[in-house]
Image (tube, rainbow, N blue to C red):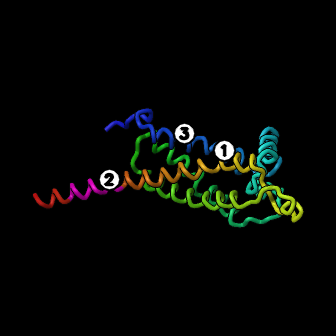
Amino acid sequence: MAPRPLTSRPLDLVYFGFFVSHIFASLCIDFQALYPPALVPSFLRVFANWYLEMSNDPFLNVMFGRDNDPLIWFKSFLFLEVFFQFPTFFIAARGLLNDSRKNYVLMLVYGASTTTTVWPCLWTLLAIPGPSPAALASGIATLTFEQRAMLLSSYVPFCLLPLLMTVDMALRLHSIVGKALAASNADKTK
C-alpha cells in the first residue's frame, strides 16, 4: 500500500513540523552550551544573548553559565535531549514522511518523556517570584510578568504538543492492537 501524503494527515503534518523545527532549535540554541565557544557562529551567540536578556530564562542562564544555581535536574534533561530526543526527531520525521506506523511506539515514548521533563520546568517558571523589593534584596532569581509570559509561551507548547502526541499515539497503537487481536480471534474461530 502506498503511503498517504503527509499533507492529507494534518496531525502528522504538525508533528513533522515540530520535529524538523526542533532539530534546528536544538542545534542552534539548546546545544550551544555543549559546543566549544569557537565553533558557535557569532549570530547564534548574539541571538542567545538577546533571548536571555529578554526572557531571563533560568534554565538557559544555567546552561550558559550566567547563573551559579546548578539545576542539576535540568542539566540531566539536556543529556536526555542529546541522546534520546535529538535522534528521535530524525527517526520520527522520516517515519511520518513515509507514513510508517513503526514509529508510533517511539513517538509515544518521546511524547511521554518530553511532557514529563517540561512539566517541572513549567512549575519552576510559575514558582519563581516577581521582582519585589524583598526578592531583589535577597539576590534570588526573579521574573517580571512579561518575562514569565514570554517563557510560558515558549515552554507550554513543548508540553502540550508532546502530551497530545502521547495520547494520539496511545490511541493509534490501541486501535492497531485491537484490530490485530480481532483478526487473530476471527482466524481461530474459522
Q: Is residue 38 left or right of residue 184?
A: right
Amino acid, disc 2 = Ser
Q: CA distance from mark 2 to mark 3?
A: 25 Å
Q: CA distance from mark 2 to mark 1?
A: 33 Å
Tell me if residue 126 comes above or below residue 55 in the rendering.
Answer: below
Image quadrant holding the N terminus, namely top left
- Image location (x, y in percent) of residue 112: 51, 58
Where is mark 3, residue-wise?
Answer: 17
Q: Please tell me the numbered disc located at residue 139.
A: none
* Res. 142 image quadrant: bottom right
In terms of sequence position, does the residue under pointer 2 or pointer 3 come before the other?
3
- Image location (x, y in percent) of residue 157: 59, 47
Q: Please tell me the numbered disc located at residue 175.
A: 2
Task: Please give the range of residues in magenta.
Answer: 174-184
- Residue shown at 47% from the left, 54% from the top: 166
**Front-lying residue, 49 or 135:** 135
Q: Secondary structure at mark 1?
A: helix
